[in-house]
Image (cartoon, grey):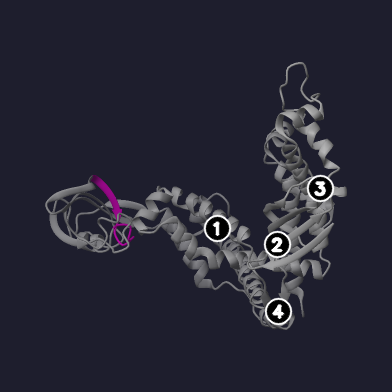
Amino acid sequence: MEVVVKKLPESRLEITVTLPWEQWGKHEAHAAEHMAESVNMPGFRKGKVPHAMLEARFGREAILVEAAEHAVHDAYPKALVEAKAEAIGRPEIQFDKVEADAPLVFTIKTDVLPEIILSDWQKKVKAINSAEAKKSVSVEAQEIDAEIEQLATMRATFTAVDRPAQSGDSVKVDFTVKQDGVVIEGGQATDHAIVLGSNTFIPGFEAAVEGMRAGEEKVFTLDFPKEYHAGHLAGKPAEFTVKLKTVEEKKLPVIDDAFVKALGKFENLSALRSSIEQGMLEEKKQTRKEEWRTALLDTVVEEATLEYPLVLVQEELERMIRQFEGQVSMMGFTLENYLKQAKKTEEELRTEWTPQAKKRIAAELVLQKIAADQDIEVTSEAIEAEMNKIFQHYKNQEHIEKNIDMSRLYTSVRGRLTNEKTLEYLEKLGL
């Protein structure tokens, strides 16, 4: 077998393979047997039609084409080994000619994992780690106070008062919103509750209600925000007619041991403060760790030289689109509606996100490169233990067998654990 390799842009290879007739012609008999399995011919059972009769009916060329496909299936992995390439995605295969007693020449075009060249990244990683080691994480008393005040706010009570409404009050209003004298869609409400100062309504609305008394009516004009979700209203003025129904004053509970005990978890205020401090400290440590790892990854990616296989970029963009689609659906939108309001096409979104997709791909490939260079591996026991944790979320063994591709899960878990171990290696470098 003769193999000629040509590098193409975007981490693609063109591999031209030449197989002598003595090698690929051996597949002709097997190809005929395979064709016979799908042929209905009177007097013969499926799979038992003689080679000569198949040739008489379909022509030898059809059998040779089938034989060529068998030969390619056999030769393709061997050609990749000879080319020292790791293919990804579906290859494009084109035959030059398929003739009996002649060499079989075919060309393979395939995406391959790119060669990654890492420059002197270790020096920069050590510098980041050295700076990180000098940092400390702490929680200030005022941060704890603010968290406790938030707990008290969540348990506030409201009492009706006879005075002008002010920031912090809970009010109920009837309102109508018109544009050009016509009520807009969703522009009417009765007994709508608002906490003034919470900024849950469009800018200016709550400020306009402040100072009103129960029973008072007011008409005013406001502009919808330029980024308002309803595109036809964004940036445009509208007339608001508001009637204030009730005004209730917020009263916060006294923050003492009795308040803390009512929460049902703590004996006294000191225990609550200690718990909040510990929780905030762990949260800050986690945030710091994520920022640290981001800085490390950004550094090694910046120091890497690689091409980006188109198939990986497309797969990552598809993953990003599907994730975003899930996010907008939680907000009550479809992706189509979002794009319409944003005045963008999905293709434009993909173009915008391509640099970010490439950055994600680079991070993954660079971590794999470092793991390979440093002989970082995870044991099968660790992988299986992690898989068992995943299985705990499923009802029974039958459910697992039906819904999980075990081989794919094993590969995914191994990759995730290897990445984690590699990041830990980077964090310790130089310390």
The image's mark for residue 227 is none
Choose the circle earlier in sequence order: 2 or 1: 2
Q: Is residue 343 left or right of residue 69?
A: left
The image's mark for residue 317 is 1
Q: Position of residue 346 (x, y in %)?
A: 45, 56
Quarter of the figure with the C terminus: bottom right
How packed mark 1 is, by other alpha carbons closer than 10 Å (few <14, some 14-19, many 20 or more), is: many
Q: Is residue 392 left or right of residue 192?
A: right
- Could you say whether the residue bearing mark 4 is in a helix, strand or loop? helix
Choose the circle earlier in sequence order: 3 or 4: 3
Q: Whole-Å distance between the Cαs marked 3 and 4?
A: 45 Å
Q: Is residue 242 visible?
A: no
The image's mark for residue 14 is 2
Which residue has dot 3 on it?
74
| Residue sitting nearer the eye, 164 or 332 | 332
Q: Whole-Å distance between the Cαs marked 4 and 2?
A: 37 Å
Instruction: Look at the image and give the residue range highlighted in magenta.
Output: 190-201
- Could you say whether the residue bearing mark 3 is in a helix, strand or loop? helix
Under mark 1, the amino acid is Leu
How packed mark 3 is, by other alpha carbons closer than 10 Å (few <14, some 14-19, many 20 or more), is: few
Q: Whole-Å distance between the Cαs marked 3 and 1?
A: 33 Å
At 62% across and 71% down in the image, what residue appears? Answer: 294
Front: mark 3 or 1: 3
Q: Whole-Å distance between the Cαs marked 2 and 1?
A: 25 Å
Front: mark 3 or 4: 3
Choose the circle earlier in sequence order: 4 or 2: 2
| Residue sitting nearer the eye, 410 or 94 | 94
> Are the two marked residues, 2 and 1, in contact with CB atoms closer than 8 angstroms?
no
Q: Position of residue 119 (x, y in %)?
A: 72, 80
Under mark 3, the amino acid is Asp
Front: mark 1 or 4: 1
